[in-house]
Image (cartoon, rainbow, N blue to C red):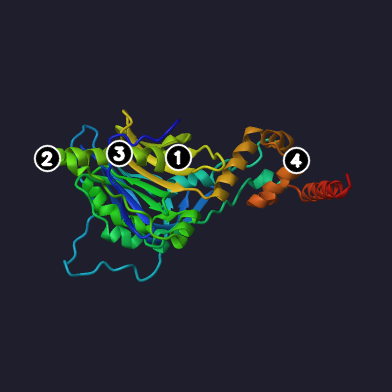
Amino acid sequence: MTGLALKGLRTLPAQTWGGVRLVPLVRDEPITDLRLDSRVYGGHGIVALDDRTSYFSYIPHGFVASWTSDGTAAAAYGTQLRAPDEPERPPAHMPLHFHRRMARRTDRNRLRFLPLHLSMEGYLALHFGGPTIVWEEWSRRAVTQGLSPRVEEAYTGAVITGLEDALRVFEIHHGQCGVLVYAADALAAAFVVPHPADYRALHITLVNDLYGELIYHYAMLSGPVQDFRARLDETRIRSLADLRAQVRTQQDGWARFHDDLMAGALLTGEYTRQTVHDMGPYRLSRLLPSFERRRENHLAETITDASGVLAYLKTFRLSENQVRRGHLLSSLAASDWHLADTAAALGLTPPALAARIKSAGFGHLLRQDVLDRYRAERRRLTSEGKARRREPR
């Protein structure tokens, strides 16, 4: 599929705090027959995916989606009562939770799923089985175990410089159902929910979400970003109607600039959609990017209706190293894991491809004698190239 449309949402002017820019997304008509609430876990978790595979991660919270099949309003569950002056206490320890599957039905019209982990599982499981044809270059471990285990690193929002403060002082707009988070004007994450009440309840969960390595370093090293300033032509303002018209023009101009340029890579990228669960009139899906090099690549998970209206969205921006690994695995799979064919498709020599596989952390998939042979050949070609450059003309 091409593009990720923010159908049913409008972009409002951004607010900034230091190096963090927050762009609000509002709905003119909230979605009332699908609601989201949070289920707090506050610790590490193990998710059993099937009989042979488990997923280990920091899982601070899950989302519970509740919907109705006849279009009537749904209520958000999971609230708890406490005294107004009683602080919300964090858990005294970090418990270990066991879950079955990333998305699991808890009632007829209720589904529990783990936000971001749903899409991260899709990335970690990318060509997880390893070589589909036992070419002579692949090790016995590659054939019997594939890419097990796959490990990726991420940072919680609590360590992203300025994010918690930005969320605390952020002005939540009337009808707001989402936000796009930027660090040093690099798109870090998109978050969309069905209803404004859901957003107000889940706004702070962005601090507990996962963010990529690039975003962590951008937020830590960047200075304050430039704020959006409206420029009104005072000579053309004679009434409140004129003022409203100019404000509307400024808002529309900002929305076009943001959607076309700042969020353009997210909204126009190529994605592979995998349906995870049908939820009455809605569909929970995860999206894998094209892994095109030297451009933004985002993992995403969505809930959409039959007409394509976006009810829920969460994204995770991959680092360049993660994009490189995804691109490499996809290229190998496209050539049936044949090294010579993959090298030709990538414009490389087989020794250079073997070096790239090793630097990506997949060196254990190749037989050691094959790695040694390719390393020696690559060293010989490098030496010959240096010798030719030293020869007098």
Say which residue appears at 59% left-offset and 38% top-offset.
330
Read off the residue under disc 3.
253
Left of 165 or right of it: where is 220? right
Q: Which of marks 2 and 3 is in front?
A: 2
Alpha carbon separation for disc pair 1 and 4: 32 Å
Residue 2 seen from this side: yes
Q: Nearer the viewer, mark 3 or mark 4?
A: 3
Q: Which of marks 2 and 3 is nearer the N terminus?
A: 2
Q: Residues within 10 Å of mark 2 (few under 14, many from 20)?
A: few
Read off the residue under disc 2.
238
Read off the residue under disc 4.
350
Q: Are marks 2 and 1 in contact (CB under 8 Å)?
A: no
Left of 388 or right of it: where is 177? left
Residue 295: image x %, image y %?
52, 42
Quadrant of image for the N terminus: top left
Which residue appears farthest toward the left when viewing the image?
239
Q: Is mark 2 on a helix, strand or loop?
A: loop
Instruction: From this view, report whether residue 101 is shown above or below residue 71.
Output: below
**Mark 3: which amino acid?**
Gly
Alpha carbon separation for disc pair 2 and 4: 71 Å
Q: Which of marks 1 and 4 is in front?
A: 1
Q: How crowded is mark 1: few (under 14 residues within 10 Å), some or many (20 or more)?
A: some
Residue 76 seen from this side: no
Q: What element carries label 1?
A: helix
Alpha carbon separation for disc pair 2 and 3: 22 Å
Read off the residue under disc 1.
265
Q: In which quarter of the image is residue 61?
A: bottom left
Alpha carbon separation for disc pair 3 and 1: 19 Å
Q: Looking at the image, which is closer to me, 115 or 310?
A: 310
Q: Which of marks 1 and 4 is nearer the N terminus?
A: 1
